[in-house]
Amino acid sequence: MKKILVTGGAGFIGSHVVRLLVNKYPQYKIVNLDALTYAGNLENLKDIEHASNYEFVKGDITDPKTVGRLFATQKFDGIIHLAAESHVDRSISNPMEFITTNIVGTVTLLNAAREQWKDDFGGKLFYHISTDEVYGSLGAEGFFTESTPYDPRSPYSASKASSDHLVRAYHHTYGLPVVISNCSNNYGPNQFPEKLLPLAINNILNKKSIPVYGKGDNIRDWLYVEDHAAAIDVIFHQGKVGETYNIGGFNEWKNIDLIHLLCKVMDQELNRPQGDSAGLITFVKDRAGHDQRYAIDAEKLSSELGWKPSLQFEEGLTKTVRWYLSNQEWMNRVLSGAYESYYNEQYGDR
Ligand code: NAD
Ligand code: TYD
């Protein structure tokens, strides 16, 4: 019996990680700590909410009392830390929340883990989930490897870089057993519609314009969210303490090409004439400090731990589009904020 704390489990990636662990490891107890910010949604976990090896705790990772109490009562063997403010555009308009959640929140968890495990680090693991954005921006050539120097350029990526440094510092200074992974852009079901793909899907569905920043020539490497969750499972169980693993889809797309492909898939799925959705593309003012290109070299993870992405991109994109089209109620509730009432109905003020 292992007890694992997942932070941010009601968010996009966290909910896929929680589902995978709850279903795959009935002998583990999975505790999901989430503050349910605008990005957290318990509806994402409706299918497993009554599983006997799952517990949800509403709480803020920046609050040492909440975190300390939880650690004292639950005696975790491992932590998979995903809770964060995660949207670059929000970090540009409101950097302070990113500093508080991503940096102070991570240190609050590190302190609690160190305190609980100080007599015996054996078999324990603090797994910190990070992003490829900490490495900065690439030109036309090259890839991020685990030894690429950090060069974060947005408040979001700087706050994630800072949290990565602190996790490593706790390993080197106190011997805390840690592992870190840095992943590329995820896509798939349950992503909050402020990120490119769900936003574009929702706008196409409603025949609203699709805002493409700048010339649409920025490049991202896309990975299906369940493949990221599978990589996290592999790294949590087989990763070497103190190591970093890059996770990526070997799947680079220029934003404008990605949007054209999405438009084609949406036209097909909605039985609209081909070219209909592409007519909605609108070039808008570029994001400040917009990183040009991210591309991950995930060779270490593949050669050392045997992980590879399972889905071809066209297949993953079609699956994603179909999920949003058959879950339009999810989208409407997320956008209306009505999922908060769902939470209150389900859990009261706990
Ligand atoms: P998300 O924004 O969808 O979810 C974040 C979750 O954290 C939400 O459920 C939210 O309620 C919770 N949260 C926020 N502040 C909290 C706090 N103070 N206390 C407790 N819970 C809090 O994010 P995501 O896209 O699922 O990303 C999860 C993690 O993966 C983040 O650490 C992010 O940096 C990292 N990551 C994301 C991507 C991506 O493409 N989305 C890629 C690489 C890495
Ligand atoms: P996003 O999903 O915000 O992820 P990130 O900034 O973390 O990579 O954006 C993906 C890419 O799409 C990024 O280059 C910015 C661009 N983008 C748009 O062109 N229009 C939009 O409305 C959004 C949200 C993003």
Image (cartoon, rainbow, N blue to C red):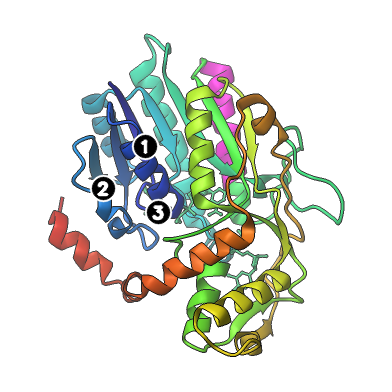
| Amino acid residing under circle 3 | Gly
Q: Give the main secondary structure of the magenta stretch.
A: helix
Q: Is residue 236 found left or right of 334 in the rendered image? A: right
Magenta region, residue range: 160-174
Q: Is residue 204 found left or right of 306 in the rendered image? A: left
Residue that label 3 marks: 11
Residue that label 1 marks: 21
Closest to the observer: 173 or 46?
A: 46
Q: Quadrant of the N terminus?
A: top left
| Amino acid residing under circle 2 | Ile
The residue at the point 87 percent across, 51 percent down is: 141
The residue at the point 64 percent across, 32 percent down is: 301
Disc 2 versus disc 3: distance between alpha carbons?
A: 15 Å
As drawn, the label of residue 254 is: none
Is residue 271 visible in the rendered structure shown here? yes
Asked if disc 3 is less than 8 Å from ligand 1, the answer is: yes
Is residue 61 visible in the rendered structure shown here? no
Residue that label 2 marks: 48
Disc 2 versus disc 1: distance between alpha carbons?
A: 11 Å
Evaluate if marks 2 and 3 touch, with contact meaning CB atoms under 8 Å apart: no
